[in-house]
Amino acid sequence: MKKKQFMTDNKNKISAVAKLIKESTMTVALTGAGISVESGIDPFRGEKGLWAKYNPEEYAYIDAFYENPAKVWQMLKELLAIIIFSKPNNGHVGLAQLEEMGYLSSIITQNVDGLHQAAGSRNVIEFHGNNRWLLCIECSNRYETDPDIIKNIPPRCECGGILRPDVVFFGEAIPQKAMVKAYANAKSCDVMLVIGTSAIVSPASEIPLVAKDSGAKIIEINPEPTPLTDQVANLTIYEKAGTTIPMIVSELKKKS
Ligand code: OAD
């Protein structure tokens, strides 16, 4: 497709999405690692993804953590060093503006970087936990994550127990509150924006299906196609989140 045609198509899609959001009584966003790529945080999959560098079998499973916490902490430390100093990008800010304008009810995020909240979003459901807190695996004591506490790895609690981040490892259940809230939101929304996720990790990947089954329109924002594209999504905008979301915000501002 020629560049001019692509841009006209995208412009038409932005107008269509803005119209859907305007007419919707409840719009919910589901976000994945892609929305934070423009903040300098690499995604999980793909050439530059975390799982290309670290085998998830050895680093992402809870059993792997218990087997060799020092090894898994090497990866976590590298990740946290980036996350701690990262800032929200135009995609995060755009979603916070949509909430502020009354157009977005909630964000269900698979991300553990806290950037939605840093951008000002208030109703954020953290499906895979977050990196703001470290928990002792012995006494459950909590510590706020900061560069000092992870200087020596694995970090330890006052009681001597090893600390883990308050995130969901593979092999662990989704926090119950987040699960219940996310599914309730998916069932009641009439538009779902699915942004920057490869949509292959269950149960998060099922959230758009639940929304669709309950009658919602599914809008995907992702430079690459996913299993949702053409199957579940009513419309896909093949663009970066940081470019697309501000355009949707501008379009909604124009019309209100
Ligand atoms: P992935 O790394 O699987 O997918 C990131 C998606 O973002 C891809 O589809 C990219 O095409 C897209 N993308 C890249 N840059 C983008 C941009 N600027 N704007 C919009 N989209 C962009 O990340 P997730 O789908 O979030 O789970 O991965 C799901 C889960 O798998 C994670 O929460 C994590 C991981 O293993 C756990 O660790 C439990």
Image (cartoon, rainbow, N blue to C red):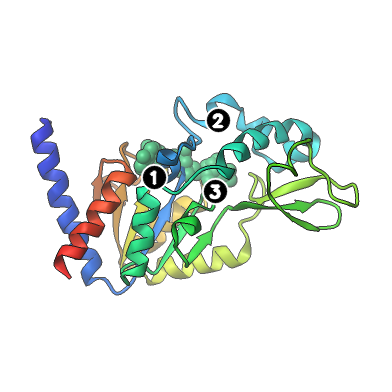
- The circle drawn on residue 113 is 3
Helix, strand or loop status at disc 3? loop
Which quadrant would the C terminus be assigned to in this image?
bottom left
- Residue found at x 34% / y 60%: 192
**Number of residues whose C-alpha sits closer than 10 Å to that of mark 1, classed few (under 14), some (14–19) or many (20 or more):** many
Q: Which residue is mark 1?
A: 196
Q: Which residue is mark 2?
A: 51
Residue furthest toward the bottom? Answer: 25
**Number of residues whose C-alpha sits closer than 10 Å to that of mark 3, classed few (under 14), some (14–19) or many (20 or more):** many
Is disc 1's CB within 8 Å of ligand 1? yes
Please tell me which of labels 2 and 3 falls first in the chain: 2
Q: Quadrant of residue 143?
A: bottom right
Foreground residue among 43 and 66: 43
**Residue contact at pointers 1 and 3, CB within 8 angstroms:** no
**Number of residues whose C-alpha sits closer than 10 Å to that of mark 2, classed few (under 14), some (14–19) or many (20 or more):** some
Three-letter amino acid code at the position of disc 2: Trp
In this image, 8 relative to 63: left or right?
left
Q: Position of residue 27 (x, y in %)?
A: 33, 66
In this image, 160 relative to 95: left or right?
right
Foreground residue among 128 and 35: 35
Spatial CA span between label 2 and label 3: 17 Å
Q: Position of residue 103 (x, y in %)?
A: 31, 68
Q: Position of residue 186 (x, y in %)?
A: 41, 65
Helix, strand or loop status at disc 2? helix
Is disc 2's CB within 8 Å of ligand 1? yes
Residue furthest toward the right? Answer: 159
Please tell me which of labels 2 and 1 falls first in the chain: 2
- Residue found at x 48% / y 34%: 42
